[in-house]
Image (tube, rainbow, N blue to C red):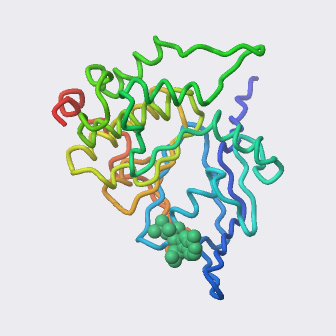
Amino acid sequence: MEYVQPVQSTPIILAENLTKVYQAGRLQVTAVRDVSLAVEPSEFVAIVGPSGSGKSTLFYLLGGLTQATHGRVIIDGVDFATLSDAERTRLRKHRIGFVFQKFNLLPTLSAMGNIEIAYAVSGRTEGGKKVPLDRVYLDHLSDLLSIQGRLKHRPAELSGGEQQRVAIARALITRPAIVLADEPTGNLDTKNSEAVLQMLLRSNRELGQTTLMITHNPEAAAIAGRILHMRDGEIVSEESGSRSGMVTPGLRSAATVV
Ligand code: ADP
């Protein structure tokens, strides 16, 4: 008789008893309080909560952009705290793609130039040699994000939604295992927000990265498979996303309108 072994999955993001205390003059602010969470590979998780609830601080901790006062962050089995600054930067560059509310595109470069420079900065090497940018993969990404016709344009010539989709392509070009998005729809109108959310969902599905999105908007959060609610620095509840898995039919045409 054969037994099917249960699949043992290891979380790709593991936070254990994370606390972050800021010193503001003589005042101490506990922005994140004893937070533990585990995110499995390929999950799409949203962290939602009102302004000041500690979402951004948790984002910075999970992305290795700031150090915890207590507790630890383990990314793909590696404890951030055991790394030197240079090693932490390397892990971040190779394993994590960041998407921010402000698109942060370089204004003097075209969309394509922004993506290319992000790839060059990541310094991907194999056997001591630089790995050239995979143009086929870039085509695939541009297609997925519906930015094919926009790549020669500078950011100022693109709509907000297009700029954010270029920023997502820039985050994905290094093939990160994890995408961390901080209020990715915060600067966008409803239509553009929906297109960007659908693109994040599609890239999560089709490219298989783990996606963690911070938002104050419950409607945006609903697209995630799992939603964690934050209040006063703590995760207070968890639920499934009511719009999880919904890829809007006719997305491509919706995306090209914006
Ligand atoms: P959110 O992203 O949910 O708005 P934040 O993580 O930005 O929440 O902030 C959580 C708390 O920590 C707030 O009370 C905020 O004022 C405080 N805080 C954030 N950053 C700093 C800082 N650099 N110095 C002092 N206090 C901070």
The answer to whether residue 141 of the structure is visible from this angle is yes
Q: Which residue is most to the front?
A: 108
Position of residue 165 in the picture relative to residue 126 (left or right): left
Q: Which residue is most to the right?
A: 82
**Which quadrant would the N terminus be assigned to in this image?**
top right
Q: Which residue is most to the bottom?
A: 26
Residue in view at x 48 percent, y 58 percent: 47
Q: Nearer the viewer, residue 163 or 168?
A: 163
Residue in view at x 35 percent, y 35 percent: 165
238 w.r.t. 137: above or below = below
Q: Quadrant of residue 157?
A: top left
73 w.r.t. 30: above or below = above
Residue in view at x 40 percent, y 52 percent: 101
Query: Number of numbered discs present?
Result: 0
Q: Nearer the viewer, residue 219 or 90?
A: 90
241 w.r.t. 198: above or below = below
63 w.r.t. 134: above or below = below
Q: Nearer the viewer, residue 13 or 146?
A: 146
Position in image of residue 145 (x %, y %): 34, 28
